[in-house]
């Protein structure tokens, strides 16, 4: 982008941000403006999981020159403060200033990656396609690639490209149909996919995406074109023209080479967005990828983003942060892996929590977090690619997994669809431990869902040394009861940079086993591993560096407590006991390496036979895959959404007591975990 | 916009543009880059009607500091060159530089305004609505405003806003229908418009535009909402959801107050875009406006823009220039005049020439100008507001007047529809003298159309002192045969700044009558009004300043010659003589003050009784108005497009001879004009 500056901003100060990566951004700011806000406006994506409340300490920057108005908080040592370190969120502009943004201020976002340990991407995809087959779903195959041959124009035949294509296509679709019946067809490989069944009779609509490419494709290919053709159901409703006439087919893309008709399945998590490019005729996954949700600079949890979405322009800012800054590039990257033009992506399916669905569509969501917790929508129908701004075909059909409540969203209904929870006769449970925790209890004929405000602790958020389960993360910890010395397992075998969710579960379990902390999570032993300052006590996991503070432990205890008490409340509602659960699926970003024994030891999960627990990774993406391909799956998802009862815990009598009782290690009623 | 600058551009020079208006833009440019191109990239809209060929001389800027590589051309006097004046298009970057951009470099674009003389806006609108009635058209009334009352949500009733609205709306639509039948309805005034006939049975779709506003509207209004509801035909095909189920109604907008359902009719001219905000239920025009087509900085005529559209990113640059920089603000302004939220604009109709239609949709158009002159499309169906990026309702139905050829576009088919040329038994002709000339010859049962490459001369383009028919334009001229002194009429009675199309017709007619120029347009008398330099001879209309050069006269003779020869060719094709024409409608930017006698004297129009000529202003906008409101009109327009025969003059035998014969004043065969 060229830098254009309008003059006449004399009443504004100039703030220059230099990143450790070497990029430089300059912005103008009023006196008193928060350095974090100025950075956000200038496009510097400094992380602020707490959204600038000064609690998470992740927005540490260094003042190079100029002055800001800031007081030293718990997150900055005296030495560092003297050295110019400040929290961006607690620094107010006083005048021109130059600010250095260290890599650490980006780390939480930039180092996010889907947890690959235990289940490599191949296994993950196999699980997803396996579930699809188990459920008896099959691809609709309602998007096809059809070759159309036309006469070249001349002065005597100056028909326009679109009308020329429309004239020739009807015939081509018919012959394609014949070809299909001849060669058995529908292995779905190009060019076989280009001889798929077709409805050749009705008039043909041509979408704006196809129209833009048409002139060059026809002339690059002596007036032959491979058309990506969607039938009525697959064209997001775009098959009815303004006049009202219905088309059976719509050309949504054209190219010079045969192409596989593709769609993209998206799991939009609060922290991570995952994408899967899928061949529509066969269901074959062509590529996968994931990226950090760009909204994270507006807060790690949904609450802070809902607040931001209510500010002027906030909903659009959040929409851009996820759609244009995150999903669009992610789409380009998965398409590039498969050698597909993103503008040919013919279908999009989306699973995300209720807040993510709202913010993706640019809808203010503040009512989600305010009693009586009413979202703008549960099911959004009839959207097209053009409505999303993610660079896919403007005519692409868009399927969004429906929500059942403010805090039980499409990611959960999709997860139930994928795991088939709704089809099983035995009692089972789905626990999704992402940035928030959601729980579904399923029995013969009922589906009960609730959300527990676990917060991002399980993904390492809101923890002073927390990080995602990626290279450098401590994922397993043992402690010597005598010396209090830890033994660590680190992802990627590199020097530890932080602790991920599974690591915290084991670390806190060990700290408690060794009586280094008491049931309330307070330090009760002394030693060189135990340090404390005016703000906090901490256990040094590394002699200098990675540590866990009493505040961290407190956050984590509340997180595990909210999950356990939610499970208890659900079971009580149905007169069940934990031991009645035949199967407990654990999904989400906490990672496959979760040590069930440790989780039970700290009172996070009930003490039932370990083999009943199964970590299933990203079940939300699996559900998105199902509805991308199959109308049956979409119908079943609608039934799941209609049949699921949402329990609002925050107002449920008795839940608070359960929660308070669970905010100990392991629990006020320790017998529960024997 | 905040100014962010990425560093690491050391190999680029810094060019600062200061406008006479006081704005400052800075850009970075490589050595050798054209100053005009750098300005365009930096968003400085310097005019270049000739698109940087150095022929029009409109991109005069003044070098303040730094150096550029430029030679003095015909458009810069030695004194001015010494004073730092340069043509931006003929100046190459040598290093850092500061450039002053005088108002004159913007004038041609910024001072564009629809010619209001003779026909004030009110008369113009009366003509448009009058034609609509004469044709027997009536508004479809398929977009209504319906009040929906809902129960406020509670913890026991936490239904989402959309589902809540959908539940209550069916009932409301029914009762609205009853109310309508009770109070006679359909005066269309809000709130009467809110009790219009409705189809209450089928399920209700809710568009993303409505969804974004829903939460705040419901809560601002104790869960009552006024819904703008479009029926199937009116909803641009968006009424079929991805699942394939059809909706009879679609809520495309919600508001707290009753609103009139509105649409916008657009005439997209090469030079000027005109807009008309219309109440859909009654057809009442609510406001009008016009603005310069932002594409003009890429060339005054379609050819230069078609070339630009084939360059990398060119089609998207041109789309933005007209859609986002011109139509979007124009839409906001006409909506503001009527107090309407632009996102509630439920229908859009567009009439423009073939090139304008392509560039609006971001479709490269180079094939339009290259033999065999094949556009990408004649009719583009099924588009929605979201496809245009002009800030209207994303679900708005979009109607684009179809073209019949590369150089006979939707502006002409729309003009025929509006004037009813296709319905008249007698022989008549429509001559549209905009930036290009198009001619339609209609008789009992036939429609013949052609384009003549008249260029922008009739609008003052490509003329050294040419300007649009707006304040300061000389629109009428008389010359004293003895003294050669002119008498001038100036629009707005202010000091003359230039000459508009009608002024040139009279000026050249007078110069010829007074034998100051010969039949070839060369100066043959001497006097203090006649000046000449190394480049050109000129007649000084003002002793110092406004003048007309032999080059200007030559341009104009070719323009009028192409129009006259095109008329002759058409008439010959049908075995008719000019005297057979009962009616000749003159439309377009040349202005209502055209003096027919002068036009005949210079051989631009055939010598038939003056009363058979009528200036009708913007017939393209009138046609857009018709199709915005009426399905009958859209059906007739489709017939017109299908029934019109396009004559490609450039390859038509005999046309070239006609043209050459017509490139004299008045003509090689002067008897034609006696």
Image (cartoon, coloured by chain):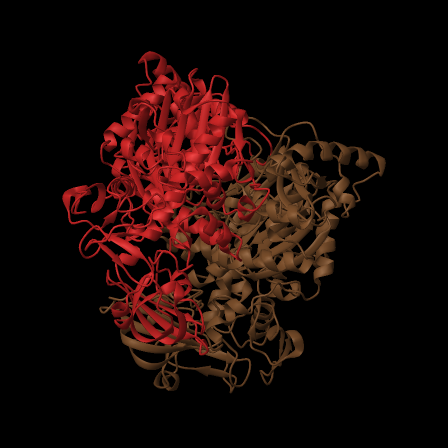
Chain colours: A brown, B red
Residue B106 drawn at (x, y percent): 30, 55
| Vertical side of B19 occupied by A341: above or below | above
Residue drawn at (27%, 66%), measured in percent from left and top? A7
Quadrant (top left/top right/bottom left/bottom right) for the N terminus of chain A: bottom left
Q: In this rendering, does residue A371 appear at all? A: no
Q: How many numbered badges does the structure rendering display?
A: 0
Foreground pick, A563 / B418: B418
Mark yes or no: residue A345 visible: yes
Which quadrant would residue A70 be assigned to in this image? bottom left
Q: Judge by depth and name the residue closer to the eye, B269 or A412.
A: B269
- Residue A225 against residue A657 in the figure, above or below: above
Q: Nearer the viewer, residue A615 or A80?
A: A80
The image shows residue A663 at horizontal and vertical percentages of 49, 61
Which quadrant of the rendered structure holds the C terminus of chain A? bottom right
At a point 50% along the width and 30% down the height, the residue shown is A242
Quarter assignment of residue B612: top left
**Res B661 → quadrant:** top left
Instruction: Tell me which residue sits at (59%, 47%) in the image.
Output: A213
> Residue B580 location, x and y as percent?
41, 20
What residue occupies the far right of the structure in this picture? Answer: A183
Which residue is drawn at the image coordinates 36% and 45% (left, top)?
Answer: B556
Residue A635 placement (x, y as % from top left): 63, 35
């Amino acid at each position: 982008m060229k830098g254009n500056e309008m003059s006449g901003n004399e009443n504004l100060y100039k703030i220059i941000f230099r990143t450790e990566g070497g990029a430089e951004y300059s912005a103008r700011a009023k006196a008193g403006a928060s350095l974090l806000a100025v950075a956000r406006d200038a496009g510097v994506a400094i992380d602020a999981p707490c959204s600038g409340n000064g609690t998470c300490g992740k927005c540490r920057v260094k003042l190079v020159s100029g002055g800001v108005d800031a007081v030293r908080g718990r997150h900055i040592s005296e030495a560092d403060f003297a050295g110019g370190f400040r929290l961006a969120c607690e620094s107010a502009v006083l005048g021109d200033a130059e600010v250095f943004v260290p890599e650490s201020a980006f780390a939480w976002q930039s180092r996010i990656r889907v947890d690959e340990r235990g289940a490599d991407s191949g296994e993950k995809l196999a699980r997803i396609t396996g579930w699809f087959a188990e459920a008896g779903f099959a691809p609709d195959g309602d998007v096809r690639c059809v070759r159309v041959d036309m006469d070249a124009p001349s002065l005597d035949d100056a028909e326009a490209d679109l009308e020329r294509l429309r004239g020739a296509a009807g015939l081509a679709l018919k012959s394609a149909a014949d070809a299909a019946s001849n060669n058995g067809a529908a292995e779905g490989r190009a060019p076989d996919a280009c001889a798929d069944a077709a409805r050749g009779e009705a008039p043909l609509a041509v979408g704006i995406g196809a129209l833009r490419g048409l002139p060059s494709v026809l002339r690059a290919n002596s007036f032959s074109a491979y058309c990506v053709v969607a039938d009525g159901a697959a064209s997001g409703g775009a098959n009815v023209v303004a006049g009202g006439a219905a088309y059976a087919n719509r050309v949504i893309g054209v190219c010079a080479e045969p192409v596989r008709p593709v769609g993209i399945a998206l799991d939009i998590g609060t922290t991570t967005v995952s994408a899967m490019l899928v061949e529509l005729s066969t269901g074959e996954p062509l590529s996968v990828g994931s990226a950090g949700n760009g909204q994270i600079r507006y807060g790690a949890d949904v609450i802070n983003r809902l607040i931001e979405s209510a500010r002027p322009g906030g909903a659009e800012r959040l929409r851009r942060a996820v759609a244009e800054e995150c999903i669009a590039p992610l789409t380009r990257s998965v398409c590039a892996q498969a050698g597909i033009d993103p503008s040919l992506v013919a279908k999009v399916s989306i699973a995300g929590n209720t807040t993510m669905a709202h913010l993706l569509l640019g809808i203010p969501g503040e009512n989600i977090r305010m009693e009586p917790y009413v979202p703008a929508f549960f099911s959004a129908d009839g959207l097209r690619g053009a409505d999303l701004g993610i660079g896919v075909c403007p005519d692409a059909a868009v399927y969004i997994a429906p929500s059942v409540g403010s805090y039980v969203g499409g990611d959960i209904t999709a997860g139930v669809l994928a795991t088939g929870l709704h089809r099983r006769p035995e009692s089972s449970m789905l626990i999704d431990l992402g940035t928030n925790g959601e729980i579904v209890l399923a029995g013969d004929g009922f589906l009960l869902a609730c959300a527990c405000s676990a917060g991002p602790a399980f993904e390492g958020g809101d923890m002073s040394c927390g990080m995602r389960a990626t290279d450098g993360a401590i994922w397993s910890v043992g402690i010597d009861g005598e010396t209090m010395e830890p033994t660590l397992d680190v992802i990627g075998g590199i020097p530890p940079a932080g602790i991920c969710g599974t690591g915290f579960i084991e670390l806190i379990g060990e700290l408690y086993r060794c009586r280094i902390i008491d049931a309330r999570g307070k330090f009760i032993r002394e030693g060189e591993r135990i340090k404390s300052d005016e703000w906090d006590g901490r256990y040094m996991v590394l002699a200098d560096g990675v540590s866990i503070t009493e505040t961290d432990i407190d956050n984590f205890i509340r997180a595990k407590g909210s999950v356990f008490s939610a499970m208890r409340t659900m079971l009580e509602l149905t007169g069940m006991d934990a031991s009645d659960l035949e199967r407990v699926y654990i999904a989400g970003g906490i990672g496959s390496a979760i040590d069930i024994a440790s989780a039970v030891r700290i009172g996070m999960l009930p003490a039932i036979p370990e083999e009943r627990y199964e970590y299933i990774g990203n079940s939300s993406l699996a559900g998105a895959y199902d509805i991308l391909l199959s109308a049956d799956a979409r119908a079943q998802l609608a039934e799941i959404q209609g049949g699921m009862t949402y329990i609002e815990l925050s107002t449920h009598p008795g839940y608070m007591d359960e929660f308070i009782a669970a905010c100990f290690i392991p629990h006020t009623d320790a017998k529960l975990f024997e």
